Amino acid sequence: MERDPNKLSRREAIAAGITGSAAVGAGLTAAPAEARDAAGFKGRIAPVMSASTPDIRQEVVPAADSPNVLLIILDDVGFADLGCYGGEIPTPNIDRLAASGIRYTNFRTTGVCSATRASVMTGLNPHSAGIGWLTFSDSGYPGYRGDLAEDAETMAERFSEAGYCAYHVGKWHVNLADTTNAAGPTRNWPSQRGYARSYWFQGHSTDYFAPAQLYAGNERITPPVDGYYATDDFTDKALAFLRDHRAQRGDRPFLMTLAHPGAHSPLQARREDIARFKGAYDAGWDVLRAARLERQKAMGLIPADAVLPPANPGVPRWDTLDPAQRRVQARYMEVYAAMIARIDDGVGRILDALDASGDHDNTIVALISDNGGAPDGRGGTPNLLAMVNGGVTPAQVAERLDEIGGPDSYPMYSLGWASVSNTPFRLYKHDTHLGGIADPLILSWPKAIPARGELRGQFLHAIDLLPTLLDAAGLSATSGRAGAKPIEGRSARPSFTDRAAPDPRDRQYFEMGGLRAMRLGRWRIVSKGRFGLPGDAWELYDTATDPNETRDLAAERPDIVERLDRAWMKEAQAHQVFPIDDRSLLERSFAELFRGGGKDRWSIIPPIDLIPEESSPKLLGRDFEVELTLADAGRQGVLFAHGNQFLGAVAFVRDGRVRFEFRCDPHLIALDAPWPAKARSVRFVQRLSARPRVGRLSIVIDGREAAALDSDRLLLGTPMQGLQIGRNDAVRASPRYAAPFAFDGRIERVEIRTDNKPYDAGEIAAASRAYAAPARKD
């Protein structure tokens, strides 16, 4: 007799874990209760599959012929640096992208990278997204958490939910600095915010030749040092992701965000690229700025009658520099140009790959920069981190001229070249004048944008980019996620095909470190000083007749100033701008140090991975002890390294001596002592008598002080490479050894203790004076 598949024997029922009345009798005709109640299950469960109805999960599939999206983000690249925006730096591939689509002339960002990236990623104003400034620390207020808000849905989350495959390569910088470590929390890492694959670094910058904090997904990796250059690596990884996508998920569209670190400091480039530009900037910034203006006029980027604003404060005329100064200044810009050119080479490789795969026509490629050219280098420096530690004298710069831009430098160009980058606008990154927030935006989508090389004058803000891309992809800007903040930007898609399309918005507020601006229709107000401090006053400009802020009309039209002031206040209240951060730039940058508190004891059992800079003990500017217990004293190698030669502290054994160094090239503070072959403990100590600079360093071996040094030039700052125990990978902390210089003894334990008392007002003032002081002559 044929067996009824809907009935089980008692033995079969027991074996299957089915009990109770359902198993009584000849068989079983009902499904277990837990199966019937499975959340969301729409099929039918019988005892066997042949009698059941499956409910196969269906992935969300984008509409047929949905476009791919590639967003390329440049860093600290000014409005005028690209060839297609009037620059003399050769960018033939970016120019090719512009020739295949449209360029916007009134695209605006925020004044710094994190805030812009938060807006681009979420379609929210930066304060609404929780990142009104950078990600160094949580200020304790909603608009300045320094961490992407949980209710701010990201671009990758929205596209992934629609069935796209999302990939991120390069700079991230929208998660709180202290969360970038092996233990997390990882809530705002790329893999947790919608990206299927990611290859990235946190922080505002990276060493281009030897990055120490590079992540593949959630795992830190160490790339090979020989021949490495970050821009090329990120281009290679983007291409690899695209190849893998086509092979494995070619039936789906992709979203890729490629965020190059260039041309953010440190200005580092391949030697052969720097050589391409030797002599190209000998004419100086005055000539180059004027030449860029004329090209911009010829291209129609600005009106033919536009004039340059006066030189920014602190920028000397080129002809007042002596020949040696001119040569140094030209070198900085040669390196900067080399970085841009290398990015352009990578863009060309990606465009060629899209052509070869047949994806070019139906890929939306958007290219932006996150803010204007940066003023951080002031008069130019071969080591940006030395600026808070006494600077670098002209003689010292001249000695290492040929090193500038290479792996043994951490340079930044001067205010004069930053002014050129931001032609024809005033001021720089960090500012709410247009030099800080006017940026290139190129859009190409050959299938749907018929324009070839045309300009668009619509006013767009960074918050408008996401809704524009969603609209172009046929996706709703309304989130399906419960509790998600609604997008605050608006789509600019009508401008793709209509030069006369209206602006997607008629108003936009700006705030950055207490500097403010408001655009309402054709009018724009911008503050001369920081909110509530001396010098805080509005300037007024008519953007229709004066697009680069050369004629202040505030005195003539106080009625308009008042109207825009009210509009700014309303927007600020609506978007979490208050309380405005009235701390100085130094106080904001060193908030964690000055505020005190936090973890003050560390117990480490080696070997361990590098502890990233944001999560490592903060040793500079406070008392500390680093105590190592040894099982074997060894003969040579690094005991601990905090940071690198550009700014850091290190202890190592070599040639029978133990050496304790503080280095901020070219500054060096060092002491050493004989290294006993049977040493069992060694302690490296800093005791400050007047924070942050004055104090005593000592080496204590087996309880006895073996060496000590008093100094009034101790270092301040955040080293850029974290903490390592027993070795020193990536950029070495001292040139007296070759990395990694692993310790050949055995370290049993490391105990680190720091004095985390808050800085008082006098100590903060002392730190600020040191930052403002020029380099010493010695």
Image (cartoon, rainbow, N blue to C red):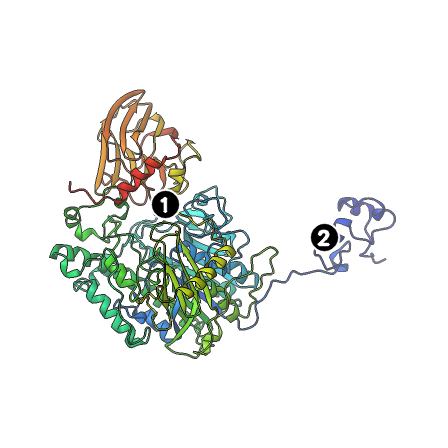
The residue that appears at 71% across and 60% down in the rendered structure is 54
Decide which of 513, 106 is in the foreground and name it.
Answer: 513
| Amino acid under disc 1 | Ser
The residue that appears at 25% across and 55% down in the rendered structure is 413
Label 2 vs 1, first from the N-terminus: 2
Left or right relative to 378: residue 111: right
Q: Quadrant of the C terminus?
A: top left
Determine which residue is flagged by label 2.
38
Give neighbour class at mark 2: few <14, some 14-19, many 20+ (Cα, 10 Å): few
Compared with 234, 447 (above or below) is below
* Gap between marks 2 and 1 measured at Cα: 51 Å
Q: What is the x, y in percent for residue 171?
A: 40, 54
Q: What is the x, y in percent for residue 512?
A: 40, 54
Left or right relative to 300: residue 778: left
| C-beta proximity under 8 Å, tags 2 and 1 | no
Q: Nearer the viewer, mark 2 or mark 1?
A: 1
Q: What is the x, y in percent for residue 725?
A: 36, 35
Compared with 26, 734 (above or below) is above
Decide which of 507, 113 is in the foreground and name it.
Answer: 507
Decide which of 21, 60 is in the foreground and name it.
Answer: 60
Decide which of 468, 24 is in the foreground and name it.
Answer: 468
Q: What is the x, y in percent for residue 516?
A: 40, 57
Give neighbour class at mark 1: few <14, some 14-19, many 20+ (Cα, 10 Å): some
Residue extending farthest left: 323
| Amino acid under disc 2 | Ala
Res 312 → quadrant = bottom left
Determine which residue is flagged by label 1.
589
